Amino acid sequence: MTEKIDIRVAKILELDRIVINKGKADNIDEHMEFLIYDEGEEIIDPVSGKSLGLLENPKGIFKVMHIQENVSILLSKTKRPNKMFAGLNMYSDIDIERDLLKSIKIGDKVKITNQTL
């Protein structure tokens, strides 16, 4: 899969499960991982003045849970709270990651972060 395909969030099932608009017909396989993101501002090189492209604002990393012909269900790889320590009320980055997952919207861009051989 060398050409770039336009992968988007098609549906949000739960906070940590989403559907993308690509499946078996698009060579999606169970070993792929995906970054959900939106595009931010253009970054300019302070030395050359040239555009370095648009900043990608990450919203979450996902792995394949289920593949159909034209869609796939992805599961978040975001850390989940351990119920054993829930009563300790310890600060962690779990809340930040949960907020990022909550920011995912239908139509958000998705890209493959690894390629299978």
Image (spheres, rainbow, N blue to C red):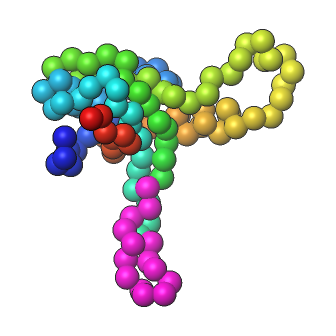
**Residue 109: percent from left, percent from top:** 33, 45
In this orientation, does residue 10 appear? Answer: no
**Residue 81: percent from left, percent from top:** 68, 21
Q: Which residues are magenta?
A: 43-56
Q: Is residue 53 magenta?
A: yes
Looking at the image, the residue that sits furthest to the left is 25
Asked whether, in this view, residue 28 is left or right of residue 78, the answer is left
Looking at the image, the residue that sits furthest to the front is 117
Looking at the image, the residue that sits furthest to the right is 88
Instruction: For the N terminus, give its image quadrant.
Output: top left
Residue at figure coordinates x 26%, y 25% from the top left = 29
In this orientation, does residue 88 appear? Answer: yes
Residue at figure coordinates x 78%, y 12% from the top left = 84
Instruction: For the C terminus, give its image quadrant.
Output: top left
Looking at the image, the residue that sits furthest to the top is 84
- Above or below residue 105? Residue 4 is below
